[in-house]
Image (tube, helix red, strand yellow):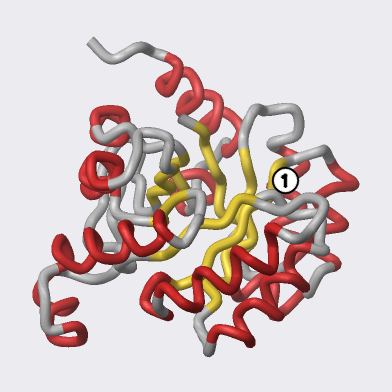
Amino acid sequence: MKLCVALDMATMEQNLALAKELKGLDLWLKVGLRSYLRDGAKIIDEIKKIDDFKIFLDLKLHDIPNTMADAAEVIASLPVDMINIHASAGKRAMSEVMNRLNALKSRPIVLAVSALTSFSDNSFRIVYNDSIKEFVLKFCVSAYEAGLDGMVCSVFESNMIKDATSRFFLTLTPGIRPFNEESNDQNRVADLEVAKQENSDFIVVGRPVYEDDNPRAMCERILEEIEIPRE
C-alpha cells in the first residue's frame, strides 16, 4: 500500500512548501483540479525540481470519447505517473483513451473513477437511480475490460472490485482519515486498518497531513503504520 498526499491547499507556494517538507519520503503526491487550473503544468515541473516524487494528476476526465482521448494524450506528455477518467463516460470512452495511450512509448497508470466518496448511498441513488455497490460493480468490470489499470473508489469497495476483476487491478481510495480524524465533506471514510483489510493499493490523505502541526511527522507515522503487517 502506497501513501498519496493531496496537495489541496490555497496557493501553489503552500503546496510546494509541503512538498519540500516531505522530500525523501516514500510517497506519492496528488495534484487536483483546483491546483492544476490555478497553476497549470508549472506545478508539476516545480514539484519535480524538489524531488523525484511520483505524481497523480487528479483531473477526472469526463467527455465524449474522442475528446477524452485527446485530453489524456496531452496529459500523458506531462511528467506525471498516474491519471484518472470517469467510468461513467462509458466503456467506449475508456477504451478509446487506452487505445490512444497504449500507442505511446510510455504512459501513466490510468484509473477509472467509480462513485465519488462525497456520495452517500441515498444521494447516489437520486442521481443514478441505483445503489453505489451495483454501479461500482458495473463500472469496475467495464474499466477492467477496457484495459484500465484500476479504480478510484471508496475503501469499502476495494476488495469487492478485486473480486470482480483481478487482485492485480489497482484500487486508489480517497477519504482516508488515518487515525479517525474528522471526515469533513467526505461520507465514505475509513482509517488505515480498514484500508489494510480492504487491500487498497493507494490511500489518499489530504487534510490530516497538511492541517497537522508537523506534516512530515504525520506522514512518517502513516508510513510506519502501513508497514506493520495485518494480524
**Residue occupying image coordinates x 40% and y 53%:** 174
- Is 124 or 26 nearer to us in this picture? 124
Q: Is residue 68 left or right of residue 212?
A: right
For disc 1, the neighbor class at 10 Å (few under 14, some 14 to 19, many from 20) is many
* Amino acid type at image mark 1: Ala
The relative height of residue 138 versus residue 175 in the rendered view (above or below) is: below
Residue 49 locus on image (x, y percent)? 90, 47
Whether residue 184 appears in this view of the structure is yes
Q: Residue furthest right?
A: 49
Quarter holding the C terminus? top left
**Residue occupying image coordinates x 69% and y 36%:** 22
Total marks placed: 1
The relative height of residue 95 versus residue 49 in the rendered view (above or below) is: below
Residue 227 locus on image (x, y percent)? 45, 16
Residue 206 locus on image (x, y percent)? 49, 52
Whether residue 32 appears in this view of the structure is no
- Is 40 or 16 nearer to us in this picture? 40
Look at mark 1 in the image and give the residue it sits on.
19
**Residue occupying image coordinates x 16% and y 79%:** 123
> Mark 1 falls on what kind of element?
helix
The relative height of residue 68 versus residue 216 in the rendered view (above or below) is: below
